[in-house]
């Protein structure tokens, strides 16, 4: 595919115009931006200043599944996800495409994510680098069953086969369910250290809100795919987590009927691998 783009960058964003003004110029083209019903003028700003970015306006806040729209519209075999506050290092997507070309069973490349101006290695990248699952034959790096939403390149075919991101979870902990579903379908997922993304998160954060989302989505993901003992353990962890954990459980309850309707078990090999990662703290 010499001379043709192999990777489309897909960004989903809501009310983060200032972050996009910084990050959009840094993405290699093509780029698809899905605007989750922003009210800060994002759509008009992008039309005026970045006419080469394909803007998608679903007319509602779809959360993480907004990325599914971008993947379906992409005309390349591979898709790189980015946040409105992240971008890919120079040459990273060419490297990821080369790896995916060479490894037909590989569905997802998990990148090395460097945080902030100091380029600190993200703790989750460090855990993936040290994955206890080792390197499977035919894969380019340690096997993983998770990834960072701002640091992954996917094979479009595999992503769509696995159903993309889940609207039961909506936003925050959406990566685990997709990762285990890809593995359940026989695809490989690997951490590749020389595929690099930069993440400059806003210093204005809501730690308790994020803890509540993490607790909610940990429980819902377990309901969707994991044994009941894992559901119980994660629910107990949320209860022990104080007000943020309690808030997470409360917000999980209205989503439980849909999670139960979509519940299905994982192959034994994938469940064993997920347990092994959890025992190692991953």
Image (cartoon, rainbow, N blue to C red):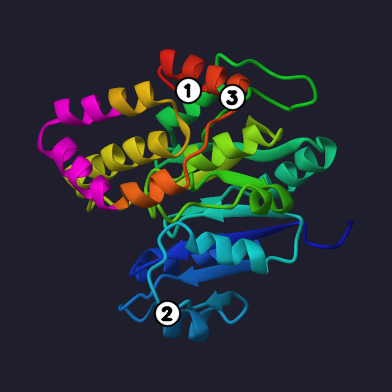
For label 2, the residue is 59
From the image, tell me which residue sits under label 1.
127
Residue drawn 21% across the image and 40% down it = 249
Image quadrant in which you'd find residue 193? top right
Of the numbered discs 2 and 1, the one sitting upstream in the chain is: 2
Relative vertical location of residue 72 with respect to residue 217 in this rendering, above or below? below
Coordinates of residue 49 in the picture (x, y in percent): 51, 81
Location of residue 274 in the rendering, given as x and y in whole percent from the top left corner: 51, 22
Badge 1 density bin: few <14, some 14–19, many ≥20, Cα 10 Å: some
Q: Is residue 39 left or right of residue 154?
A: left
**Above or below, comparing residue 36 to residue 154 in the picture:** below
Residue 65 vs residue 252, the one in the foreground:
252
Residue 270: which numbered mark, if any?
A: 3
Q: Is residue 135 left or right of residue 124?
A: right
Who comes first in sequence, dot 1 or dot 3?
1
Q: Look at the image and give the residue range highlighted in magenta.
A: 234-254
């Amino acid at each position: 595919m010499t001379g043709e783009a192999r990777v489309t960058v897909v960004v989903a964003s809501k009310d983060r115009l200032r972050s996009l003004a910084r990050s959009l110029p840094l993405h290699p083209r093509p780029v698809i931006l899905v605007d989750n019903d922003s009210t800060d003028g994002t759509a008009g700003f992008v039309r005026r200043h970045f006419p080469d970015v394909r803007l998608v306006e679903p007319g509602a806040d779809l959360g993480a599944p907004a990325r599914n729209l971008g993947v379906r519209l992409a005309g390349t075999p591979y898709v790189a996800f980015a946040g409105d506050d992240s971008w890919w290092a120079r040459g990273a997507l060419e490297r990821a495409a080369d790896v995916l070309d060479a490894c037909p069973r590989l569905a997802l490349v998990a990148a090395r994510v460097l945080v902030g101006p100091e380029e600190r290695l993200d703790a989750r990248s460090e855990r993936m680098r040290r994955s206890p699952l080792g390197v499977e034959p035919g894969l380019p790096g340690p096997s993983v069953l998770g990834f960072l939403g701002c640091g992954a390149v996917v094979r479009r075919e595999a992503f769509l086969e696995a159903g993309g991101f889940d609207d039961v979870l909506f936003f925050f902990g959406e990566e685990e369910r997709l990762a285990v579903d890809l593995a359940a379908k026989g695809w490989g997922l690997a951490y590749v250290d020389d595929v690099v993304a930069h993440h400059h998160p806003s210093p204005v954060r809501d730690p308790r809100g994020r803890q509540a989302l993490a607790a909610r989505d940990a429980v819902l993901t377990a309901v969707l795919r994991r044994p009941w003992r894992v559901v119980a353990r994660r629910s107990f962890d949320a209860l022990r987590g104080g007000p943020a954990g309690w808030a997470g459980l409360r917000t999980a309850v209205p989503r439980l009927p849909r999670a139960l309707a979509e519940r299905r078990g994982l192959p034994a090999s994938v469940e064993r691998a997920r347990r092994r990662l959890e025992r190692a703290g991953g």
